[in-house]
Image (cartoon, grey):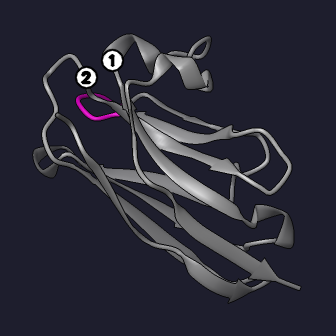
Amino acid sequence: QVQLAESGGGSVQAGGSLRLSCVASTLTYSMRCMGWFRQAPGKEREGVAVTYLAGSTTYYADSVKGRFTISKEPVNNTVHLQMSSLEPDDTAMYYCAAGPVWVCSFESWSKLTAYSYWGQGSQVTVSS
């Protein structure tokens, strides 16, 4: 059973930075699309960023482009999310997700049902 362990997050003032990390206990070669989603209170879970561990494919939500950067350590089945210039609207529970390779496409990357595994979530709170 694949387990995703998230770390990082916390509370920061607007304009600050935080870093999230996610380690997958094990991933088959076909299950190497990893990324981040977030869910704010009263809102639906939405895609933030995703990357293909074995290639260069990366996608970002328009709301975080230029502020967030997803990086990876393929050998360790690990992805990071560096969040800068944080805004109060970035406040949410952030979830790591992993799915099959085909999910890392423009059409599919933001679809929750496409992912096979989810982490427990890490809270990010940005105060104004």
Residue at 33% of width from left, 16% of height from top? 101
Residue 31: give its label: 2
Sort mark 1 into few (<14), some (14-19) or many (20+) by Cα contacts within 10 Å.
Answer: some
Identify residue for label 1. 100
Q: Is residue 119 visible?
A: yes
Above or below, comparing residue 5 to residue 63 in the picture: below
Earlier in the chain: of badge 2 and badge 1, it is 2
Q: Contact (CB < 8 A) between labels 2 and 1?
A: yes
Q: Is residue 84 visible?
A: no
Q: Tag 1's secondary structure?
A: loop
Q: Tag 2's secondary structure?
A: loop
Residue 45: give its label: none
Task: Give amino acid for label 1.
Answer: Pro
Residue 15: horizontal and vertical position, in percent?
76, 82
Q: Does the magenta stretch include residue 113?
A: no
In the picture, measured across the screen, residue 46 lies left or right of residue 127, that is left
Sort mark 2 into few (<14), some (14-19) or many (20+) by Cα contacts within 10 Å.
Answer: some
Task: Give amino acid for label 2.
Answer: Met
Residue at 56% of width from left, 42% of height from top? 49
Query: Which span is picked out in magenta?
Result: 52-56
Residue at 44% of width from left, 54% of height from top? 120
Residue 44: horizontal and vertical position, in percent?
77, 38
Quarter occupied by the N terminus = top left
